[in-house]
Amino acid sequence: MKRLTLKGGMLIVTAAVLLNGCTQATKPGDEYLDSGADVSEATSGTRIGTIGEADALAGTALAGMKISYEKDAINDPENVLSIKTIYFAYDSSEISEEDVEVIKHHGKYMALHPDVSVRLEGHTDERGTREYNVALADRRAQSVKKLMLFQGPSATQATIISYGEEKPAALGHDEAAWKLNRRVELVYE
Amino acid sequence: MLKRWILLLFLCCLTQAANAVLKIDITEGIEGATPIAIIPFKWSGAEKPVDADISAIVSSDLARSGKFSSVPERGLLAQPQRPEDIHFKTWRVAGVDHLVIGAVQKAANGMFKVEFRLFNVYRGEQVLGYSFNATRAMLRTTAHQISDLIFEQLTGLPGAFNTRIAYVTSAGKPAEYRLQVADTDGYNPQTLLTSSEPIMSPVWSPDGSKVAYVSFETGASAIYIHNIRTGEREKIAAFDGINSAPAWSPDGQSLAMTLSKDGNPDIYVLSLRSKALRRVTRHWSIDTEPAWLPDSRSLVFTSSRSGKPQLYQLALDSGSRPRRLTFEGNYNANASVSADGKVIAFVHGAGNSYKIALLNLDTRITQVLTDGPLDESPDFAPNGTMILYASQDRGRAVLAAVSADGRQKQRLALSDGEVREPSWAAKRN
């Protein structure tokens, strides 16, 4: 198996661009925390990971996952690219540190396969109003797309559809269901 | 040709059978309501049809308004048929303020002659009397017209019974979504659209002839305008990004909507005549859920520009910045403006509870009307007396209505499946 890795100088460029991207995705006011239950889920700031390095995923829930970008890697359950759902805190479109890594790998994969396209489906939980939730889910998908594009794929490779609260992944009216519903799904086509 | 007709008929029957009727239960509060006795109308020339019992329809319309308590049929002291049969003193003693009598007569040509008289019990005199000619199919409509006339006579406010409501239903797994319109009491449901993809945000044109809505049927969101009489529809907006939250201006000239085609959810106004599209908000936060004020020149909308969703007011041609309207609580969204422009109904969230609240634009006083926990999509009745909204009942999505004074509540549920996003037409067309 051939692994594609990024080296030295290019890594620095990528990191700088990413920093920029994260600033955009989390403007002041966009990352406030709701008091109570959701505080622990929210994160602030983003550490920049090192794509392709052996220890990139160490110490995270992604530790031990494979990193490679062959065409069918997205179907390998052991590959980091098998993670295709990004979860969010309540009323937030901020991406967690760990998911920044996941999205970077997807962006890299797409840059290496210009014929591949992905649909980013944005969702929210049922709380709040339906049309605000469509807008919120759109912002979630936009955050994922921006981060992805910094890895170099063409903007036309990623399309966005925002469903708001209309298509829950889990039924139920409690946090156990809500946390599964606040998500962006990456659907490769 | 004949075959095609038979197929068409068959399809019509199917649609009818599949349309579940909304069942209405008054769940809270009749104290303070004016007692009125609706005497069962006398039918001649035809049996009283179960689905068009005019006096029963009027009685339930008036009770639903929250402003009247109809004396139940078994509680009626007498059932006078003619004015000279009414013994006003007896009704006065019983505390009944108003009394309605009427009759339905089927003529040889198949038409029905419906007449009614409204009496003021204390003055012992007739205050209103009308006679109508109606086809069999129009009997329920006639009953709602009578309710409107009585309501207006006694309250000074226009009635809102003889119009229609639109709403979205979903049932089954995978879900099948339907856009339906029905009479305000849930009868005569008609399906405008059936889809395996979500349908959202139905809203009536001011003349009650069209419904604008969002459909995901093509795999992306688009806004459509659907003529309910001809069934014709027009795709109005299908830009990249979201196409959401259509709102018809009261003068019928424009449709406000939320688009993210320029990178971020912002509010745009589309001129329906020239099709010119104008961006009216410009902010990196979420701006959505536009609602028009009666002047058709200003909007109330939801924005997260302060960090959390709050309501703002924007005068379109002033060039000034939007003015923040709500300050209590950290989630105030999805405004509906009363027809007189004095009051806004909206979703007020606190913690995990979302309730319907009113904001008086003159006094700036906020009043919470419902108990939550997941109430949304408020829509004022055309006469401002009630607010229709979406709620949850034991985990199931139902419609509910609350009187604007918060005293009276009712629930409108489908026999199966979920129902949401109600919109109340100002007129029947």
Image: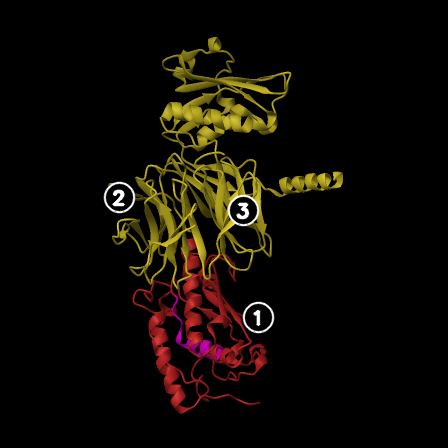
Give the crowd class for mark 1: few <14, some 14-19, many >=20 residues within 10 Å.
Answer: few
Q: Nearer the viewer, mark 3 or mark 2?
A: 3
Left or right placement of residue A76 versus residue B269 in this view = right
- Residue B197 locus on image (x, y percent): 56, 56
- Residue A142 locus on image (x, y percent): 42, 67
**What is the three-letter code of the residue carrying label 3?**
Arg
Q: Quadrant of residue B386?
A: top left
Residue occupying the point 38% across, 40% down:
B250
The residue pinned by badge 3 equals B233
Image: magenta residue range: A93-106
Answer whether residue B310 is magenta in the image: no
The residue pinned by badge 2 equals B365
For the colour yellow, the matching chain is B
Residue occupying the point 37% across, 79% down:
A17
Q: How is the image coloured?
A: by chain
Callout 3: helix, strand or loop?
A: strand
Report the disc number at residue B12.
none
- The single residue placed furthest to the top in the displayed view is B84
Alpha carbon distance from label 2 to label 1: 52 Å
Answer whether residue A102 is magenta in the image: yes
Q: Earlier in the sequence, mark 3 or mark 2?
A: 3
